[in-house]
Amino acid sequence: FKGQDYAADRIHEEALKFLKDNREGPFFLYYPNIIPHVALHIPDKELEPYLAQKWNDPPFTRDKGGYTPHFTPR
């Protein structure tokens, strides 16, 4: 998915807005950082410098399933 909004930025902006809107009274703000839990799709302007570069690394291809269990259970 390549959307128009970067989720981490949107959530941060909404959290800041909530803080400003509720600064006069008591409130609770739970602000989870979603970065470790989502696929990272960076804004196009951040990706542009890398698009024209030549990469010598071969692409990663997986010849088996996506999940590889440990050989020995813990």
Image (cartoon, helix red, strand yellow):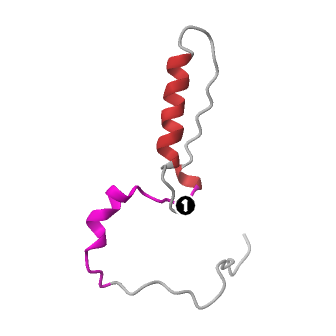
Across and down, in percent, residue 24 comes to 55, 8
Please state if 48 lies on the left or on the right of 19 as rendered: left
Q: Is residue 18 above or below residue 63?
A: above
Q: Is residue 59 above or below residue 42?
A: below
Q: What range of the chain is rendered magenta?
A: 38-56
- Is label 1 in a helix, a strand or a loop? loop
Q: Quadrant of the N terminus?
A: bottom right
Residue name at image x 57 percent, y 56 percent: 38
Across and down, in percent, residue 23 comes to 53, 13
Q: Quadrant of residue 26?
A: top right
Residue name at image x 69 percent, y 77 percent: 69
Across and down, in percent, residue 9 comes to 46, 42
Q: Amino acid at mark 1?
A: Ala
Residue 10 located within the stretch drawn in magenta: no
Residue name at image x 51 percent, y 87 percent: 61
Q: Residue furthest bottom?
A: 63
Check disc 1 and report the residue beneath it. Answer: 39
